[in-house]
Amino acid sequence: MGKEFLKLKADERKSYAVILLVGLGITIALGINTWQERKLTNGYELLKNDQEEGDYEEHLIARVGEEKIPLAVLVKERALTEKEAKEEILKAREMLPAYLMGENESLKNVTTDLNFITRVPDTYVEVQWVERGSEFFSYDGEIKEDLELLEMVELKVSAILSCQGISEDYETTITLMPKSLKVSEALLNQIEKQQEEKPENEVLILPDTYEGKTVTWKKVPDYTFLWIFVLTVLSVLLLKLGQKRDVEEEKKKRQERLEREYAQIVSKFTMLLSAGLSVRNAWERIVLLYRRKEDTQNIVFQELNWGLMQMQKGVPELEVYEVFGIRTGLVHYKKMMAIFISDRKRGSVNLLDAMNQEMLLAWEEKKRKTRQHGEKIGTKLLIPMMGMLGIVFVIILVPAFLSFEL
């Protein structure tokens, strides 16, 4: 088993190791959870859940003599003692005013809605409201919309606090204050009143005073034109950045294509040179092969075709080789062009040896790149595979955890 595991590829070993570790971790977690969930103590005692934790069902086996009887026992949650219930009511009595006042500063200065809660948070106490000022408040504590107070009003609200059969009365006094209008609301009311009184006027006269203070008016400037200008500038910048990114992406794809085909180009040149052709004739033959395959959109063909056209126009071969290496922008092509330039200057004594060596190096580099690309794809596939594994674990574990809670 161990030898077979070592024979697997690195990415496969990683995948299996992750799956095993995740599965082992979940198994240990479930085992610990199962042990902690054991509620049968001393052989005859089942621990009850505390208040609000609910009832639970425990599956047991009762052994009567030699007979084993499977039973499902419903264990109800523990009830509070009378002392605990009274303590809860006392606690709720102290907390209730803070919840009742809602967003008001205090119960002595009520200007907005109250909060008639039916249960005091963090306690087991239920609240049943007996008197809630129904003339002023709705059932849930909202101030009635048509309410207009000219002076403050004091009123009592009362409720019954109950906890597991024990009940106590609760009563408090609140002071409802007249709602003061904001300046904006008062001005709008004046404007609306004038329009209702004189709807036939051709112009709307705005208030010039408010509570003895002078009111001046001016129109809010419309800055739409500035927003349009900003959006225009941003659009131009984004367009420029997009074009720059497209150019860089195209350049990257071009270099990747050139690099992918380098080993084949070196092999073709080496084969043709070994057959006795000169560098220029080999160049022409390779261009012709691309044309016969109708692969004229290939970036390698386009660069080679450019070099051939330059030679045919009378540009010296040395200059063509040098510029060709610069145009490709890749070290491999520059190295091959350097071999051709060296051959033109010093003769072709070592040309084939140099090209054969370059061909071997090119194919080794291609194999290395292919292997890296495969590992990269394997790593990318590992993420969705782990996602699918996680979904499977969720489908299996969620019902298990829910059954524990029940």
Image: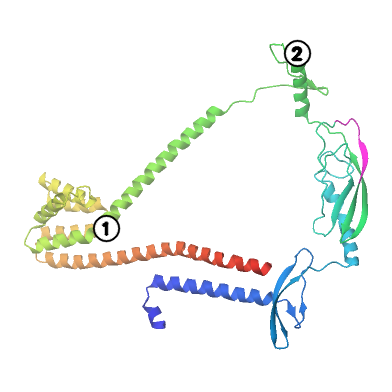
The residue lying toward the viewer, choosing from 25 and 158, is 158
Residue 99 left/right relative to 296: right
The residue lying toward the viewer, choosing from 103 and 249, is 103
Tell whether position 243 is magenta: no
Q: Which residue is painted at 91% across and 66% down in the image?
A: 83
Quarter of the image that includes the N terminus: bottom left
Where residue 364 sits, quadrant-wise, is bottom left
The answer to whether residue 33 shows anywhere in this view is yes
Position in image of residue 202 (x %, y %): 68, 11
Q: CA distance from mark 2 to mark 1?
A: 84 Å
Query: On the image, numbered disc 1 is attached to which residue?
Result: 259
The range drawn in magenta is 148-157
Position in image of residue 110 (x %, y %): 86, 40
Position in image of residue 130 (x %, y %): 90, 47
Query: On the image, numbered disc 2 is attached to which residue?
Result: 198
Vertical comparison of 32 with 319: above or below: below
Res. 310 mark: none
Tag 1: residue type? Answer: Glu
Quarter of the image that includes the C terminus: bottom right
Vertical comparison of 194 with 261: above or below: above
SS at circle 1: helix
Where residue 53 sits, quadrant-wise, is bottom right
Dot 2 or dot 1: first in sequence order is: 2
Vertical comparison of 103 with 21: above or below: above
For label 1, count other residues whose C-alpha is less than 10 Å away and answer few (under 14), some (14-19) or many (20+).
Answer: many
Tag 2: residue type? Answer: Lys
The answer to whether residue 346 shows anywhere in this view is no
Tell whether position 149 is magenta: yes
Q: Which residue is painted at 57% across and 72% down in the image?
A: 26
